[in-house]
Amino acid sequence: MENLRISAKDLGQLALPGFCPRCFWVSRRAPKGLPYQVFPGIFSSIDSYTKKVVHRYFDVHRRAPDWLAPLAPITNYREPPHHTKFRVRHEATGILLTGALDAIFERPDGTLVLADYKTAKFTGNQDALLPLYEVQLNGYAYIAAALEWPRISALALIYTEPQTASDDAHPDRSGRDSGFAMDFAARILPLPLQPSMVEPLLRRTKEIVESDAPPAGREGCKECERLAGVVGLLAGGGAA
């Protein structure tokens, strides 16, 4: 456990209402990761394309796209650093906190706005993952402060919501000779700037992960039930 590291996004799991310490312990202690973990890469591709669209707009028009108006005033963007360059060692726990920024915007006063792109339906404060995202963005702000970046003045989620209604699928709007196009509508959700939430979660992470035995699971945790079922199946020799 001497080289314990965690991404700001994974740290956000601890803030979720349904967080299970036992599942977290298993996921962090499994030597080669968990099995059957398959995530589609298309969402990362869309988020990457969104970043290119925004940067290209700045480059051509020398200003922000109109749909970024809720973040105003912003005057320019910064290219996010590679995740290997955006990290900090938390001295009290020894944990290496890492981040993979999507967007950095500059303001006239020299401060920065950190944002994350989400290809998803915009649901505002009803989003079940909102606590995770709050930790994720504040984790980025925490790292930025440790690296002595300019002051962070705001955090935000930028939802890019696919437009999939019947009218949106009309060939006059979506048709292309090479295939078809899909529109996306942008929605901005500001998040509270509270980087002080990060350190208690790092301490909690160290407490859980360095435990020699798995902690008790959350009552009613479906993942714990599935794991127990697999263990029981193996213990029974695979008998039905």
Image (cartoon, rainbow, N blue to C red):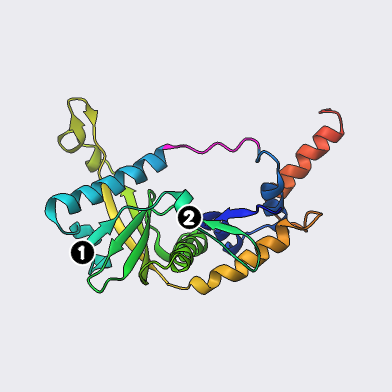
Quadrant for the C terminus in the image: top right
Query: Which numbered dot is residue 131?
Result: none
Task: Give, as a three-letter code, the residue at label 1.
Answer: Thr
| Residue 196 at x, y percent in the picture | 52, 74
Above or below 108: residue 3: above
Q: Name the residue that disc number 2 marks.
A: 99
Residue 39 painted magenta: yes
Q: Which of disc 2 and disc 1 is earlier in sequence? A: 1
At mark 1, the secondary structure is loop
Viewed as shown, does residue 120 lie left or right of 132? left
Q: Name the residue that disc number 1 marks.
A: 75
| Residue 45 at x, y percent in the picture | 37, 39
Question: Quick one: 44 or 223, which is closer to the camera?
Answer: 44
Question: Quick one: 15 or 147, which is closer to the camera?
Answer: 147
Viewed as shown, does residue 100 lie left or right of 13? left
Question: How many C-alpha atoms fall within 10 Å of the one at disc 1: few (<14), some, or many (≥20)?
Answer: some
Quick one: which residue is furthest to the top in this view? 178
Quick one: which residue is furthest to the left in this view? 61
Task: Give, as a three-letter code, the residue at label 2.
Answer: Gly
| Residue 123 at x, y percent in the picture | 40, 59
Question: How many C-alpha atoms fall within 10 Å of the one at disc 2: few (<14), some, or many (≥20)?
Answer: many
- Label 1 and label 2: CA atoms lie apart by 24 Å
Q: Which residues are magenta?
A: 35-41
Q: Quadrant of residue 176?
A: top left
* Secondary structure, magenta segment, majority class: loop
Residue 126 painted magenta: no
Residue at left offset 80%, top offset 39%: 231
Above or below 108: residue 235: above
| Residue 116 at x, y percent in the picture | 39, 56
